[in-house]
Image (cartoon, rainbow, N blue to C red):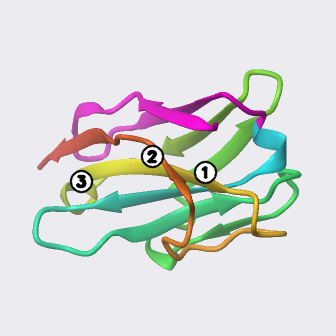
Amino acid sequence: QLQLEESGGGLVQSGGALRLSCAASGSTLDEYAIGWFRQAPGKEREGLACISRSGGSTNYKDSVKGRFTISKDNAKNTVFLEMNSLKAEDTAVYYCAADRVFRVCVLYPYYGYWGQGTQVTVSS
């Protein structure tokens, strides 16, 4: 069974950058579409970026376009989320999610496999 583990979160100043990793075990990620989500206290979980099984198609939430980049390294069985120009409002717990169902990917939380999350805190 697929297991996902996020890493790379932490405390960063406004304007800074972080790279989150989502490492998979138990199965190979080339069979799955992957999404990155976040959830801030008191808010709903929101989709930020996703990448198709092949890695050939990506999709981004408007508010992170141009700042966040999702990529997939099938050899390392890992998906990355590169985040630049971070703002205080990016503070949240960040999750990766995966599913075989999608031919491309979606920014809705309809994924079957989820990691435990990693905290990102951006100080203003």
The location of residue 85, given as percent across then percent down, is 39, 50
Query: What is the number of the mark on residue 69?
Result: 1
Q: Residues within 10 Å of mark 1 (few under 14, many from 20)?
A: some
Q: Tag 3 or tag 1, which sits nearer the N-term? A: 1
Give residue 62's position: percent from left, percent from top.
51, 78
At horizontal 28% and vertical 57% (from top left) the residue drawn is: 90
Disc on res. 51: none
Residue at 83 percent of width and 51 percent of height: 55
Q: Are the two marked residues, 1 and 3, in contact with CB atoms closer than 8 angstroms?
A: no
Q: Nearer the viewer, mark 1 or mark 3?
A: 3
Q: Tag 3: Cα neighbours inside 10 Å, few (<14), some, or many (≥20)? A: many
Q: Of helix, strand and loop, which one carries label 1?
A: strand
- Between 74 and 19, the residue placed more toward the observer is 74
Marks 2 and 1, how far apart at CA = 9 Å
Check disc 1 and give the amino acid type: Thr
Tag on residue 84? 2
One can see residue 39 in this view: yes
Q: Secondary structure at mark 3?
A: strand
Within the magenta stretch, is there residue 99?
A: no
Task: Give the residue at mark 3.
Answer: 92
Cα distance, mark 2 to mark 3?
Answer: 15 Å
